[in-house]
Structures are given as C-alpha cells and as structure tokens.
Image (cartoon, rainbow, N blue to C red):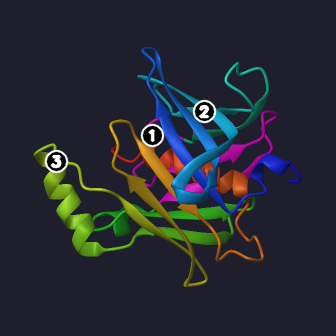
Amino acid sequence: MDDPRFGHDGFRLDQLIRPVANLYKVSALAPGDEAGAPVAFVRQKKLAIREDLRFFADESESEELFRVKARQVVDVGGRYDVTTPAGERIGVLQRRFAQTLFRTTWAIQDADEGPVADVTESSMARGILRRVAEIFDVPILYHFSILVEGRQVGEVRRILTLRDRYVMTLGGDIDRRIDRRMAVALLVVLDALQGR
C-alpha cells in the first residue's frame, strides 16, 4: 500500500457526534497527541444487524478507502474482515473471546489469516476493574499494548474528553509489519465495537 495518508506511525481517533450514524475522524498524530492531517473519515450505521464500517478519504464520503465487516450477525469470537471497496481482503481483526474475559485481546491477521500482531489491555487488574466500573457507568480509560512476536511495538490509549478520543503509536514497528490500514481499522473497532 503506497497511499501516503497511511505512511505514519501514529494516529488519533476523534468521535464526531451525528444523530443517524457514529462518525469518526482519524488523523495523523502530531506532537502533544494533537490531530495532524486527516487520514480517514469513518461511518458506522447505528442499529445495524451486521457491523459494516466504511472508511472514506474525506468527510464528503466520495472516495471509499476500505471497510470493516463482521463475518456473522452474532459471533462470540468476533471476526471482522478488512477489505478494499472491491472486496479484496487486506486482513482480519479477531476478538479473542477466551482471553477477553479478564482483559480484552484482539489479533491482527494478514489477508491469509496468518498472525501479525496481538493487541491486549496492558493491565489485567485494570481490565477487571474496568468491567466492574462499567456496571455502575463509571469510565475507566483503556490502554492497550500492541505486540509483534511478543515484543511491544506500540500502544493505544483512550484520552479523557467529552467525546471518545484515542491515540495510537506504532514507533516500535520499524519494519512496518502492521499494515497501517489495519492499524487504523483496529483503532476504530476498539471504540465502535468494544462494548459488544
């Protein structure tokens, strides 16, 4: 993928409030966790039977970049194909259900479903505390570690603001094993699908 918009090692996700759909803006990460140039705009239909997230080049949604689509309506293991608009698979995001009971864990896989990276909540204690706090509607911020072959190459942090905001850094992925489109897809999935 030679699209320069995905040539970054850091991204920021901001949720945009709209009445009919969840919208997100993904930007390149600038110093101080600030938003740099926009990378993608994402639309998630509310009350969709099967998740289908669309990533666009700009807010007018005239050029689709890629999409994330659930394989099944109900899937405990949560497998989401990341594809080009023409349907060519870029990779797969899979929620690891058994490991997610105590701390949320996702796998990033390549187009052939081979392992690329694991994404897991950085602290089991915080993961358990967050689950208890959610019962009482008390927010506990997410913090995920991104691991390639057991080595941490990045992280995802939720920033406390009125709207959902996340920051992802991938500075340790110097050989770019993680396709940045997959990284951006994961960033949105962590917010849009985390509570399901």
Mark 1 or 2 closer to N-term?
Answer: 2
Please provide the residue range marked out in magenta: 72-95
| Residue 47 horizontal/vertical position (percent) | 41, 22
Q: Which residue is mark 1?
A: 192
| Residue 89 horizontal/vertical position (percent) | 76, 48
Mark 2 or 3 closer to N-term?
Answer: 2
Label 3 neighbourhood size at 10 Å, few (<14), some (14-19), many (20+)? few
Of the residues shown, which amino acid type is indicated by label 2?
Val
Q: Which residue is mark 2?
A: 42
Q: Is residue 53 left or right of residue 8?
A: left
Label 2 neighbourhood size at 10 Å, few (<14), some (14-19), many (20+)? many
Query: What quarter of the picture does the N terminus occupy?
Result: bottom right
Vertical comparison of 62 with 67: above or below: above
Q: Residue at x 75, y 32 (%)?
A: 57
Of the residues shown, which amino acid type is indicated by label 1?
Ala
Q: Which residue is mark 3?
A: 138
Check contact, mark 1 vs mark 3: CB within 8 A. no
Q: Residue at x 71, y 22 (%)?
A: 61
| Residue 148 horizontal/vertical position (percent) | 61, 78
Asked which secondary structure carries label 3, the reply is loop
Check contact, mark 1 vs mark 2: CB within 8 A. yes
How far is mark 1 from mark 2, CA to CA?
10 Å
User: In the rendered image, which quarter is residue 67 located in?
Assistant: top right
Q: Is residue 92 visible?
A: no
Of the residues shown, which amino acid type is indicated by label 3?
Val
Query: What quarter of the picture does the C terminus occupy?
Result: top left
How far is mark 2 from mark 3, CA to CA?
27 Å
User: In the rendered image, which quarter is residue 7 located in?
Assistant: bottom right
Q: Residue at x 46, y 15 (%)?
A: 20
Vertical comparison of 36 with 179: above or below: above
